[in-house]
Structures are given as C-alpha cells and as structure tokens.
Image (cartoon, rainbow, N blue to C red):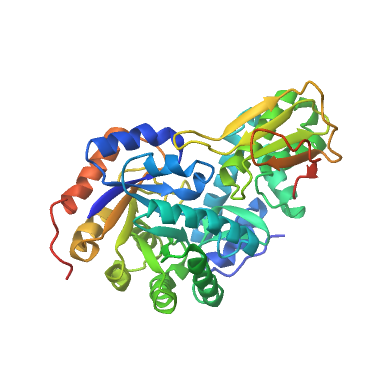
C-alpha cells in the first residue's frame, strides 16, 4: 500500500528511502524528493552494472529485474551495502531464478568488484584483502594503491595447495604486505 | 589567487603534470586518504608542487573512535611532512542505520549541530591543525540553514569552510539559498573549490554536483561578482574534475579562472 509522506524539508528526512526503490513511490512524482531519491538509486545501479556489465546479460538492458528485487532484499536483510555489496548480490543471485545462468566467470567478476571496492574505500592500516567463495577454487585478492601514479590492483589466484574453504558463502582476511609470512589466519565471514 | 587541480586517482597523473608544466595550475589537491598506502617520500616528491589535502572518507562524524585515531595518526604524519596549504574534510552523512549511502546526504544543520560540533572539535585535535569543512550542494530546503551553521561552527570550534562556490550555486538553483547568504563565510575563508555540475535525469531537474562538465556561467558570474572577497594573499581555488577528462575543456576553464583571478600580485582584501 502506498504511503504518502508529508513533503520533507531536509535531506535527513529522506534517509530511509535513499537506497530502497520501493520507498520512492511514497513521494509525488513531480517532487524534488522523488528526483532526489531517484538520483541516489542511480548511483547504486551504476555501481553494480557499470562495474559488472555481465549482469545486464542476465537481467536485460535496464538491469531492473535484478536491481529492484535485490535492493529490496538487501533492505529486508539490513545489509550494510559496504565493500561486500557485490558478494551479497552473488548470494541473492544463487537464490533467484537467475541462479543457473550465473557463470563462474561472472562470480569471479563480482568478487573482484568487491575486492576493488575494499581496496579503494577501506581506511584501515591493512593493504590487501583475500576473498574466497565456498564453492569456487580460486582466490581473489585486492591491493590498495601503492604508488602515487598507480591504482588498486586485483588478482585472481590459483593456489598450488588450496586453503580450506570458508564456512559461509564467502570468507576474507586482510594483510599488511604482499609477503604472507604470517601464514593463513583463517577465514572471517564477510560482514552484512 | 593560487589555482589548483584535484588529484584523486592514478590515471590522471599525466594530465596533472601537464597542467603544472603549462602553468595552468600552481598546486595539486590530493584526495589524501586514497594514497595512504603510498610511501611518504613518493608523496612528498611526486608532483614537485605545493599540495592541499582533501579528506574524503574519514566519516569523522559517524566512524568509531579507534578507526579514526588510527587514520588521524597516519594523516598527521603526512601533514607534518608535506605541510599542505590546507586540510579539509566533509560534513555529510555517509550512512544511515548502518547502511552506506552512495550519494552522500546532507545533515540536518539544526538537530545535528551538537554532535557535529563535538566531533569537529575532536577531529581537529586528532589532526593537529585547523580543519576546513566543505559546504554541501544542497537539494532540499534544509540547505537554507547551511550558511548560519558554518558561521556558528567557525565561532565555536575554529573550523573553517572549504567554500565550494559551485556547490553554493547548486544550493541556490535547487532550493533558493541566496548566494549573498554566504558572504560571512567567504569573508572568513581563504580556500575554495569550484567545478561543473549537471542536471538530474528526471524532472523537475535537480542540479547535481557531478564534476564532469565545464563551469557554468552562474558559477563564473558568482566568482567574478565576489572576486574581491574571494581573493587574498593566501587564497587558493581548486578546480575539481572527476569525469570526462577533456583536456582542452579543462584548460579552457582554468584560463577562465585565471581571467577572473590573474596570477599577478593581488590587491589586499577589502
């Protein structure tokens, strides 16, 4: 059922709607609030489909068959939409009618996108992240920019001696240098 | 007025070097928290030009204290070594209810004031220098409260404003905040931003701070009209570009800014 909200005065009054497509319709189509929410949602859309265009082959060219139900599920699950955005999309895809069309290549692309998002957005002292999926053999790692003119670096790695699989759909650990002298610290579940 | 250009990602380094070599810019604004894993020596000598520091993702209003203390330690080392022209950060909401906002939201300048003031005080102490906070390109009517908020914050904490002239134009066009309302802020500011903006896809069009277009006539007119208030011996103006890196277009904009603020010695502020 549609709930008409009083016209908001501040941006803060729209916070609950800025990542939830279903809430956009609570505001009149010709209002600034409606367009404000639309502009916010488009950033989430582009963050998915510009980075992983292979998703459009599943969903159709506007992406909405994936975008709207996934964002709705993400809101219900109270997902943080942090660097794990793409990993949770993979979790959702596996439960959806798209599951049998999701290739390993697309799944590695989603893992790479999450590693890249960590590498550009994380502000901790860690310099790299390793990601593993429970049902894929290779690891994906991401490194923060190490030189002034460089960029974050993403690699897919096939280990000669595989690590144990994570207990959840995905696991990760972070490192301070590329020399993994401390060994395997174990997998941490990715945050919601 | 010194004119600068923002450096956010590695792939624009050749452009920045070209702008410096051509005398189009006098300094480089580093989005410093993108480069925290770069060796400090390389940051110090990288562009052989003065730098400004723009902090993007400290999220100092909402982040947890240990994470901020760690970040501040690393930033402070860079501040002490590189001696930037200014250190700036953002007053905005980066998340809501634990969920990240990809299009940052504007705070409520009235109800959020006590919390923001406390964090600004604390963050300045952690960084060990005056902090400048960028004004938001308001969309909703709450933007009318922004100029008074920044003036009050300056009085209470000493934190200044990295005054973004085109953000003020966005706020003016979106919700009618008069440009004159910022006179008190500009008067106490020495460091400025400007950039191009674009229209929202849907109507009624919003003006969005996209950093991917040429400077608008409204922005250039604002800078020209208040030229005497903007300029001063320590003043800097950073031209931000984060998309559509059309070199000729960028140089054209920088030349327009030089036309308003010639690099010859400026008369004192009035």
Q: Position of residue B96 (x, y in %)?
A: 63, 61
Q: Quadrant of residue A165 in the image?
A: top right
Picture residue at 50% right of the left edge, 45% below the top: B34
Q: Position of residue B114 (x, y in %)?
A: 54, 77
The answer to whether B112 appears left or right of A84 in the picture is left
Q: Residue furthest top?
A: A160
- Frontmost residue, B170 versus B234: B234
Q: Nearer the viewer, residue B154 or B170?
A: B154
Query: In the drawing, does residue B200 fall left or right of residue A182?
Result: left
Residue B217 versus residue A141 in the image, above or below: below
Write the residue at 84% across / 41% down: A168
Is A159 rendered above or below residue B119? above
Tell me, yes or no, if residue B205 can be seen here. no
Q: Residue at x 29, y 67 (%)?
A: B186
Q: Horizontal and vertical percent for residue B42?
A: 43, 39
Q: Residue at x 41, y 66 (%)?
A: B130
Residue A22 percent across, percent down from the top left: 67, 53
Out of B37 and B17, give the one closest to the viewer.
B37
């Amino acid at each position: 059922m549609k709930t008409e909200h009083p016209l908001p005065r501040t941006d803060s009054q729209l916070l609950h709607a800025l990542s939830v497509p279903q809430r956009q319709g609570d505001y009149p189509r010709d209002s600034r609030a409606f367009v404000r929410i639309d502009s916010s949602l488009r950033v989430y859309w582009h963050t998915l489909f510009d980075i992983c265009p292979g998703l459009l082959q599943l969903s159709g060219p506007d992406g909405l068959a994936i975008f709207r139900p996934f964002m709705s599920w993400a809101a219900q699950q109270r997902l943080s939409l942090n660097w794990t955005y793409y990993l949770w999309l993979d979790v959702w895809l596996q439960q959806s009618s798209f599951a049998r069309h999701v290739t390993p290549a697309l799944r590695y692309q989603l893992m790479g996108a999450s590693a890249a998002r960590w590498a550009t957005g994380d502000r901790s002292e860690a310099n790299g992240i390793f990601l593993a999926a429970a049902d894929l053999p290779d690891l994906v790692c991401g490194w923060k920019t190490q030189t002034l003119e460089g960029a974050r670096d993403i690699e897919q790695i096939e280990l000669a001696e595989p690590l144990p699989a994570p207990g959840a759909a995905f696991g990760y650990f972070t490192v301070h240098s590329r020399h993994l002298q401390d060994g395997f610290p174990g997998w941490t579940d990715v945050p919601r | 007025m010194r004119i600068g250009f923002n450096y956010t990602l590695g792939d624009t380094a050749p452009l920045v070097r070209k702008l410096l070599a051509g005398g189009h810019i006098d300094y480089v604004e580093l989005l410093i928290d993108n480069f925290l894993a770069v060796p400090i020596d390389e940051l110090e000598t990288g562009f052989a030009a003065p730098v400004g520091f723009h902090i993007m993702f400290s999220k100092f209003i909402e982040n947890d204290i240990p994470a901020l203390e760690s970040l501040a330690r690393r930033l402070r080392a860079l501040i002490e070594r590189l001696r930037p022209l200014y250190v700036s950060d953002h007053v905005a909401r980066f998340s809501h209810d634990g969920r990240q906002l990809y299009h940052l939201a504007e705070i409520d300048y009235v109800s959020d004031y006590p919390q923001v003031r406390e964090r600004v005080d604390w963050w300045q102490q952690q960084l060990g220098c005056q902090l400048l906070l960028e004004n938001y390109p308001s969309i909703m009517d709450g933007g009318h409260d922004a100029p008074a908020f920044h003036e009050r914050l300056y009085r209470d904490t000493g934190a200044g404003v990295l005054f973004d002239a085109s953000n003020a134009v966005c706020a003016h066009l979106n919700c009618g905040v008069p440009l004159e309302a910022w006179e008190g802020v500009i008067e106490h500011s020495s460091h400025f931003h400007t950039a191009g903006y674009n229209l929202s896809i849907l109507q009624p069009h919003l003006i969005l701070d996209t950093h991917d277009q040429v400077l608008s006539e409204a922005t250039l007119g604002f800078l020209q009209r208040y030229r005497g208030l903007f300029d001063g011996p320590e003043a800097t103006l950073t031209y931000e570009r984060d998309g559509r890196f059309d070199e000729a277009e960028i140089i054209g904009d920088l030349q327009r800014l030089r036309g308003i603020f010639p690099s010859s010695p400026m008369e004192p502020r009035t």
